[in-house]
Image (spheres, rainbow, N blue to C red):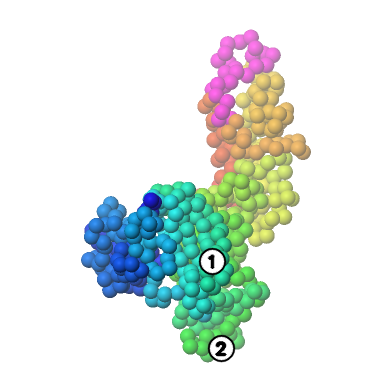
Amino acid sequence: MFSTTLALTTLTIHTALALSPSCAPGGNFDLTKRTLQLPTGTTNNPDQIPSSRLQGCNGYQDPGHNYFFTESGDGALVMKVPGDPPNTNCVTTSGSKHCRTECRESSPSSWSTTASKNRMYVDLIGVSGSQVCVGQAFQADSGYSKPVAEIYYYDNGDIKVGVEKVKAGGSQMLYQVGNVQQGKRWRTSATMATDQEEIASDGDVILVVGEETTRLRVSSMMLSAASPVFKALLGPHFREGQQARSAADPVEIALPNNASEPVTWVCLLLHHKVALELEANKVTEKLFDFAVTVDKYDCSEALRLQSRALLSQHAEDRPKRLRSDAADVRIIETAYLLRDAKCFKQQTGRLITHLRGNSSMPQAIRRYIHMLPESVLAAIEWKRNAAVNSFLEDCMSIAQCYYDNAQYDYNGFQTDVSQAIDAKRYWPPFTQRSSTASLKKAVKVLRGFGVYYKTCGECASVQDYRSKLEFEDLSLVADRVEEDCEGLCLACVLSEDADLKVACTKHT
């Protein structure tokens, strides 16, 4: 016999307040449109708890805390499912083989094919059990007698979605969508939508976007308040703005030269809605497309906080295998378009230190650049070259003989540094056509040398202190390299008259 325990931290409607362990589930979650079915009752007639009994802090939870109750520690909603009927004597509906504890949406009771969007969220922790359906959706107006989609959670952590191909059931296709071990929180969603998304249900404008003609119902007031471009388009000087519009009779505006996905994301955020797909995105190009759209409609100020959060999250979530100089350039362009000064400075500095070889900005990278001013590229190249020259000069100074300034430790310190930085090449690094050296590697090598003894014809016969290099000596050089590689100030870039080659002291 197996039983399954789930701790639900949220239902379809998230609560903005802290969960109270002393309240019934209805005090922590909106259960006004839900009915609870329990695995208890009489044969073929399981107990049903209507919405009216579920609501409020004193709403229903089963007295024995066997199947449906509030977790005493953190206020999570706990639902338990017993094993199969032969082993547990649990009660099922007629024709069902499995018992269930089900808090289902009863108003509406199924997905509609005419609704603009149907969405089911699952946000929970699987505590124990072998296999359980954690969410399902019906589509009654299409004639389906079985759920059209079900989300399953298995004891090995697999998460699978079952999609029914036949209206009468019995031909479900399973697709694995993830794996989360028991005891860890996870979240997913399933969506069915028509070709029109109701971003604003009372919107007076329908944007018809892209070649695929995605339709977005939006509010002209929200768009005009956030975007000068939309304000002008919807104003009296354009045909679209001159047309009468209302929620009952919205005006259509065609945006054929726009990609639907980033426009949808921008509109969702401007209407204070969650753009789940954008939030979960890990593809740099898609974030760049979003930034291009934000810049096109001049709404970077309105989306300033959201954009910063997205860039910060993207930097954390981006897998290392997807990181490259070309991808870094895309992030720099994205930060530039979204006006994120912190990210712009960090990423331009990162590019300066990560560029490899004897060319400051290889053509292989330049071909990815579309939106950055030439002054930014010139400043990055200048700062990188200056940092390389400073590094080489400092290393030459360190390698100089204590007695004879014309003597250098070519075969010792300089060769060891060059080979460690530049794939076994001899001094100086960075200069050969096939060089792979980077300033990031140079800093790492200098900090890793520790104590070093340089030698030359004069120094070989004198006391150690004359030729001994302390860790601090090399660390100071590394510090100067990092200082030279400081990223660019976005405010200076936007001012167009600032000298980008020197460190900014004007803007914070």
Mark-to-mark CA distance, 1 and 2: 55 Å
Query: What residue is shown at x 26% (from left), y 63% (from top)?
Result: 61
Span shown in magenta: 446-470
Q: Which amino acid is tagged 2?
A: Gln
Q: Which amino acid is tagged 1?
A: Gly
* Along the line of sight, the residue nearer the viewer: 64 or 186: 64
> Can you say whether 351 is above or below 276 in the image?
above
* Along the line of sight, the residue nearer the viewer: 496 or 114: 114
Residue at the extreme bottom of the image, as rendered: 244
Residue 137 seen anywhere in this rendered image of the structure: yes
| Residue under numbered circle 2 | 242
> Dot 1 surroundings within 10 Å: few (below 14), some, or many (20 or more)?
few
Instruction: Give whichever of discs 1 and 2 has the lower sequence position.
Output: 1
Of labels 1 and 2, the one closer to you? 1
Query: What residue is shown at x 68% (from left), y 60% (from top)?
Result: 370
Query: Where residue 177 sits: x, y (%)?
Result: 54, 56
**Is residue 212 magenta-colored?**
no
Residue 31 seen anywhere in this rendered image of the structure: no
> Dot 2 surroundings within 10 Å: few (below 14), some, or many (20 or more)?
few
Q: Secondary structure at mark 1?
A: loop
Q: What count of labels does the image hold?
A: 2
Q: Which numbered dot is residue 170?
A: 1
